[in-house]
Structure formats: C-alpha cells, structure tokens
Amino acid sequence: MLNVLLVEDEISVGNLINKGLSERGYKISLAPDGDIGYEMATKNDFDIMILDIMLPGLNGLELCKRLRNNKIDTPILMLTALSSTENIVTGLDSGADDYLAKPFKFAELEARIRSLARRKSQLQPEDNHALRVADLELNPDSKMVLRNGKRISLTSTEFRLLEFLMRNKGKVLSRMTILENVWGIDFNISTNVVDVYINYVRKKIENSFDKKLLHTVVGMGYVIKES
C-alpha cells in the first residue's frame, strides 16, 4: 500500500482524488494548504506527494522548494491548471518530479503515481566517482560541475539531466528515455520539456568554450561525447 500525501485546497478535487485513490488501495493523507502540508511532510514518511500549485499561504512551488531544501527526496507530482511550458519548467525547477495539468483523467493520475513509485523502488546506488567527458567534470556527491576548471551553476533538474547524459556518454538517448529516467515519465506525453532543458544545459556547458559536447541526432535524440 502506497502512503500518499495530497495537498489540495479545492475540497471537491481533494475529495475526488482521495476517494478514487483510496478505492484503489492507496493510503491518503489530505492537507488543505501548504503550511499544513509542510508540517505533515516533515513529520511523516510518505511514498508519494501530490501538491497543487495554487495553494493558500505557502504555495505548491514554495512548498516543494522547502521540502527539497530540507533534504526530503520523496517523489513529488505537481497539479495545476497552469499548463504552459513555462509553468511546467518552473514546477520542475522547484524540485518536482512530474507535472499534471488540470483537468486530467483519473487513469492518467494513477499512471503518473505508479511511474513515480516504480522510479523510487528501482533506484540503485550509483557510482559516485566524478564523471568526465573531455574537460567537463561532474561530481555526484558535491553536485559540482566544472568545465576546464571553471564552475558551472545548474538547477537541480539541469544537474540530473547532465548526470544522466554523462553516465551514458557516447550513447544516443531518445527523448522518451530521458523523460523516463530524469523525470520518471514512462508513457508518451505531448511536451517539449526535454528539448527546453537540453538547450538550457547546452548553453551552460558550451557557451565560452570552443569544443561542443552535447549533440543532437536528428530523429533519434541526444548524445554527449567528445568530438
């Protein structure tokens, strides 16, 4: 039985999700605002957290950031009526693992939850030695990225993306593979978030440097390699 924290201020939506997930065997704890949600999240052990963004008091984005800053790494699914790419990117940048726009089909909500649960259960200890591609170095422990000795500042999502690429250096990775391993999404959805983040990372690791490392393979995906 998965233990799920749901932070949702809309009573009708909260009751609907609570009822649907409870009937499917999930244990649901419901918080009506971000402040109560934060208190519950820090005092209890949850398998998944579902946060609405538009919350009274502490909003979902700030709640997510505080939880991550507090070293709580429970998978987080954000719910919101704001479905633009910019809002999705903002939610993921705050530390969320996935994002679902309202209105949604209940089957998709449950699929997202199962996907995040599988991702958590399948996580294996990684080799935390520094990763290198040419003069680019990433340290999984210190979360530091250097290129030719110059420190590069990345968001948490950018870091996860670059780490996944570097652990698979020389391999062409499809957008779906990247979505599954970086964002925990293992079914086809219409989003260009991978392309957006690839561009973010590419600018940060390649601007001011002559050698290009992150390459687009048309029709296939992306690869990081020495060239």
Image (spheres, rainbow, N blue to C red):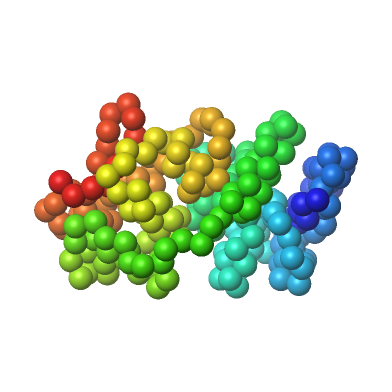
Quadrant of residue 33 within the rendered picture: bottom right
Closer to the camera in the image, 126 or 51: 126
How far across and down, in percent of the image, does residue 52 sit? 69, 50
Question: Is 181 left, or right, of 99 in this rendering?
Answer: left
Above-or-below relation of 68 to 219: below
Q: Position of residue 90 (x, y in %)?
A: 50, 52
Residue at 64% x, 60% y is 74
Q: State left or right for residue 96 relative to residue 164.
A: right
Foreground of the two, 206 or 130: 130
Residue found at the far top of this picture? 219
Q: Residue at x 27, y 33 (%)?
A: 217
* Residue 200 in view, yes or no: no
Report whether 34 appears left or right of 30: left
Q: Position of residue 39 (x, y in %)?
A: 75, 70
Q: Quick check: 148 above or below 25?
A: below
Could you tell me residue 142's position as x and y percent? 40, 73
- Residue positioned most to the left: 210
Q: Residue at x 39, y 43 (%)?
A: 196
Can residue 148 be seen here? yes
| Residue at 80% from the left image edge and 51% from the top image edge | 1
